[in-house]
Image (cartoon, rainbow, N blue to C red):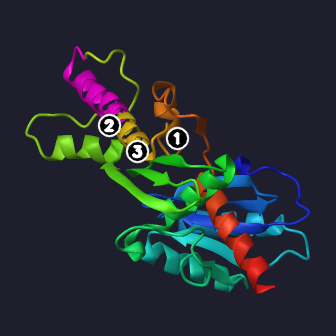
Amino acid sequence: MIAEAEQGSLRSGGVVIDIGNSSIKLGLWCDTAITGSVRLPNHDTAGLAEAIALLRGRQPDDAPTDVAIASTQPVVLKRTRSILADGGADALVVGEEIPLPLPVDVEVAEQVGVDRLCSAAAAHHRTGHACVVVDFGSAITVDLIGDDGVFLGGAILPGLAMQRSALHERTAALPLVELSLPQSPVGRSTQEAIRSGIVYGTVGAVRGLVEQFAGRLGTWPQVVATGGDLELLKDECDFCDSWVPDLGLMGVGLAYERWRRGSS
């Protein structure tokens, strides 16, 4: 895991953490970019402590000791707070100590996952205008951000792993397949038919949602994609304009930076 983090030091920057449904991403936020990002499973407590220590060790002596976090998992967040406290760092959570990174125009703003909002803020910061964010994670989210940077809502679909598990667990005969790109959309075996349904069905669903969002906007928006299944699907998603693996971490960094400027 340590080998995944870039070597060297930074002139400035803070540690940012994005706790998702199945994994945790960490990195250093510096000059509106992420460096040294690391991904590890949610259950890897030892790995999390090691990664935090590694990143904090790369900070300059005058860097802030607090760590910015976005989380959708209360149990993992509590564990992370404990690790940080043991190391003498304060945890600042987006949506709690740190304000949300962009305005939200939905029925119940408190129910929108802070991970979606951080990714949305980072995407709008990159594009400067209306855009759609697709996150190919444990759950796939497709979200719309207006020209003015307001989060307008979106759609949520089951992720690839969730789909394959449901097909296996809710049927009597369908196998649990390995996720990979199908050889053809027309599966010539049960396994390939399942892969085709999951991969091309997901691509078609996301494409259709982007088209619906474009109809609402009256123009085709720039589409920014991220998420753990990004590499598997990117070659099939020609409607996506950019692929940003650290988009969520960038959003945490933006929220943290804005909070620091406002509190100084």
Q: 187 above or below 85?
A: above
N-terminal-most mark, 2 or 3: 2
Q: Is residue 114 left or right of residue 28?
A: left
The amino acid beneath tag 1 is: Pro
Q: Which residue shows up at 22% across the image and 14% down it? A: 188
Q: 60 above or below 24?
A: below
Q: Which residue is mark 3?
A: 213
Give me the C-alpha separation between circle 1 and circle 2.
17 Å
Q: Nearer the viewer, residue 54 or 10?
A: 10
N-terminal-most mark, 1 or 2: 2
Q: Which residue shows up at 72% across the image and 48% down it? A: 3
Q: In the image, residue 39 lies at what x, y percent?
A: 59, 54
199 is within the stretch colored magenta: yes
Marks 1/3 in contact by CB < 8 Å: the verdict is yes
The amino acid beneath tag 2 is: Ala
Q: Which residue shows up at 45% across the image and 69% down it? A: 72
2 is within the stretch colored magenta: no
Which residue sits furthest left? 172
Q: Nearer the viewer, mark 2 or mark 3?
A: 3
Q: Which residue is mark 2?
A: 205
Q: In the image, residue 183 lies at what x, y percent?
A: 37, 16
Q: Quadrant of residue 212?
A: top left
Q: Main secondary structure of the magenta part?
A: helix
Q: Which residue is mark 1?
A: 221
